Amino acid sequence: MQNKDNTYKGYVTRVEPERRFGFIETESGCSYFFFIDNTEQIQRKKLGLTDKIHKFCSGDEVEFQIRTSPKDPNKNEAYNLIFIRNERRQKLIDEAKLSDSFLGYIKMIDNCLVVYYILQVLLEHSFLDFHYLC
């Protein structure tokens, strides 16, 4: 979805932090490549536009702009990403606040926190679910 100031909204669908890139998909189904550029985020923090530098991960809702790729003039890429929210992450935080406990554990894998939690299902069957908190 495009706003009047040439910004778009979408969701991060994939991130390769070691290679410093990822992909965003818009609600209309367009997919855009982006470089992970902390320089943009550091500048936004200095200007007081954000309070921290965000590590993008799958599921993040973002606002962004589009420009012609400097490496391939036939392609576009996303830049100036702004984190809006991550509903999965917020759901976990809200659940922990509400119950004041959490059935599961947190583990660090490849510099990324992974929350494993056990879901109770009918007839006392359980299964393990997990979410990445990068």
Image (cartoon, rainbow, N blue to C red):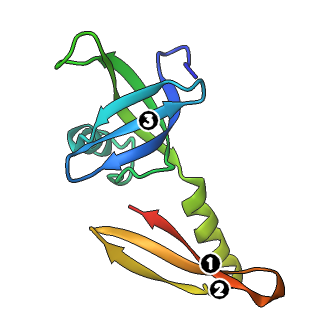
Mark nearest the camera among 3 and 1 is 3
Task: Estimate the x, y position of residue 23 in percent, counting from the top left.
Answer: 38, 37
- Secondary structure, mark 3, is strand
Residue wearing tag 2:
100
In the picture, which quadrant includes the C terminus? bottom left
Residue wearing tag 1:
96
Query: Could you tell me the amino acid type at mark 3?
Result: Ile
For the residues labelled 3 and 1, say whether their Cβ atoms are less than 8 Å apart. Answer: no
Please tell me the numbered disc located at residue 24.
Answer: 3
Crowding at dot 2, Cα within 10 Å, few <14 / some 14-19 / many 20+, comes out as: few
Q: At x 55% / y 26%, what residue is drawn? A: 29
> Between disc 3 and disc 1, whose residue precedes?
3
Task: Estimate the x, y position of residue 92 in percent, counting from the top left.
Answer: 60, 69
For the residues labelled 2 and 1, say whether their Cβ atoms are less than 8 Å apart. Answer: yes
Q: Is residue 10 left or right of residue 95?
A: left
Query: Could you tell me the amino acid type at mark 1?
Result: Ala
Return the residue nearer the eye: 93 or 18.
Answer: 18
- Secondary structure, mark 1, is helix
Q: At x 73% / y 86%, what residue is drawn? A: 125
- Secondary structure, mark 2, is loop
